[in-house]
């Protein structure tokens, strides 16, 4: 990060007392970790901080500090509005409807639309928490065990436990620093990456029973009916996409999750050498070359058909 950006960030903080931090719907570990990590840093600095996620904090992150202080709606007046780990404004849901343009966006998606007053976007960062950690170190902001636990969770989840192709020596060094601050890496790894509820595994089972593989493309879907039958509480795929991506015979994997609002959440994963973010962008979504997503209007069958066609086209074009 260059000094101009660091200075601009410091200036924003200096003139702010009441700060709102938000992140994306269906929050993952980087969204939650960035929100809690930055929130706790700013609180240590004496700021009044409000943390908001439209979908709340998923149960898998209920071991993290301050998870129970995250609200689903913003209320009141803020001097500074910060959006973390989010590449476009639509992805935060309706939280900011009455607040206008956010002041600051901290993110690492190549598809970022630069929607805030100041956009600190670093594509080389493994996770948004890496950028937050760098800012904290550069400006000697407070760090402690709780902040380290939140930040390390973002690093672990976005790198799938340090196994994505962008896992860098720098990310590993930061993880070591966070461990030295008191974060229990094996514990956080187990809580965020290994443990699954029985409902989540049943939900997987329903998805897995419909799995299809055709010429290096693998996909499945999760309907509202599946969610109900498995008693799964979230509106995500319970990370089923990462299981599909582990299938040896594939280059690209997809999961389609039917939503109550007449849309379908699509997740893509690809092996190194492929770029699924472009196809996700075509459908109004975004992400990274090997991992992308979109929320698309339409019923499950039609969205599935259109997305598979476009993905097949992209896969054939990259051969
Ligand atoms: P997911 O499939 O939801 O785990 O997301 C994979 C990657 O794509 C993550 O980096 C997400 O932040 C990004 N992503 C997912 N959905 C969207 C969306 N609707 N718009 C932009 N980026 C997205
Ligand atoms: Mn995220
Ligand atoms: Mn992220």
Image (spheres, rainbow, N blue to C red):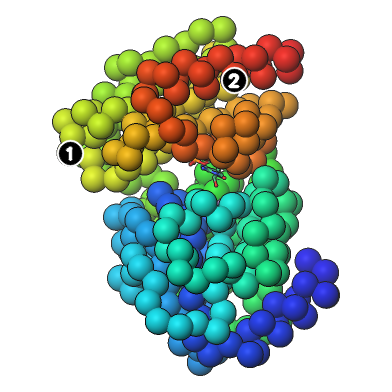
Q: Horizontal and vertical percent for residue 64?
A: 37, 66
Q: Earlier in the sequence, mark 1 or mark 2?
A: 1
Residue on which disc 1 sits: 231
Q: Quadrant of the C terminus?
A: top right
Q: Where 173 falls versus 227 (above or below)?
A: below
Q: Residue at x 36, y 41 (%)?
A: 236
Residue at the image point whose x is 69% and y is 57% from the top: 114
Classed neighbour count for the residue bearing mark 1: other residues with Cα under 10 Å, few (<14), some (14–19), many (≥20): some
Measured as percent of width and height from the top left, residue 58 is found at: 33, 54
Q: From the viewer's perspective, is 240 left or right of 203?
A: right
- Residue toward you, 249 or 79: 79
Q: Position of residue 50 (x, y in %)?
A: 42, 77
> Distance of mark 1 from mark 2, alpha carbons?
31 Å
Occupied quadrant, residue 97: bottom left
As drawn, the label of residue 261 is: none
**Residue at coordinates 45% horizontally, 69% vertically from top-left?**
98
Q: Which residue is mark 2?
A: 311
Q: Is residue 144 above or below residue 62?
A: below
50 shown above or below 111: below
The quadrant where residue 283 appears: top right
Q: Secondary structure at mark 2?
A: helix
């Amino acid at each position: 990060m260059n000094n101009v950006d660091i200075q601009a960030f410091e200036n924003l903080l200096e003139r702010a007392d009441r700060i709102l931090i938000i992140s994306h719907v269906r929050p993952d570990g980087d969204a939650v970790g960035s929100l809690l990590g930055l929130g706790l840093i700013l609180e240590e600095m004496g700021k009044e901080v409000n943390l908001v996620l439209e979908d709340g904090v998923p149960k898998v992150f209920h071991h993290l500090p301050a998870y129970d202080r995250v609200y689903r709606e913003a209320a009141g007046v803020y001097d500074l509005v910060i959006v973390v780990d989010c590449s476009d404004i639509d992805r935060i849901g309706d939280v900011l409807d009455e607040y206008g343009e956010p002041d600051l966006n901290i993110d690492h998606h190549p598809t970022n639309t630069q929607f805030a007053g100041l956009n600190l976007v670093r594509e080389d960062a493994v996770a948004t928490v890496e950028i937050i950690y760098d800012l904290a170190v550069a400006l000697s902001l407070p760090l402690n065990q709780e902040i380290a636990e939140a930040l390390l969770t973002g690093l672990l989840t976005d790198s799938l436990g340090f196994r994505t192709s962008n896992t860098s020596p720098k990310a590993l060094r930061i993880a070591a620093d966070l461990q030295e601050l008191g974060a229990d890496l094996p514990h956080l790894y187990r809580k965020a990456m290994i443990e699954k509820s029985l409902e989540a595994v049943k939900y997987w089972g329903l998805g897995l029973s419909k799995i299809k593989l055709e010429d290096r493309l693998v996909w499945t879907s999760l309907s509202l009916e599946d969610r109900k039958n498995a008693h799964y509480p979230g509106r995500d795929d319970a990370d089923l996409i990462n299981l599909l991506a582990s299938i040896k015979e594939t280059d690209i994997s997809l999961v389609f999750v039917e939503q109550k609002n007449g849309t379908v959440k699509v997740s893509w994963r690809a092996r190194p050498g492929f770029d699924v973010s472009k196809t996700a962008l075509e459908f109004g979504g975004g992400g990274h070359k090997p991992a992308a997503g979109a929320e698309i209007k339409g019923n499950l069958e039609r969205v599935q058909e259109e997305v598979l066609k476009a993905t097949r086209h992209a896969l054939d074009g990259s051969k």
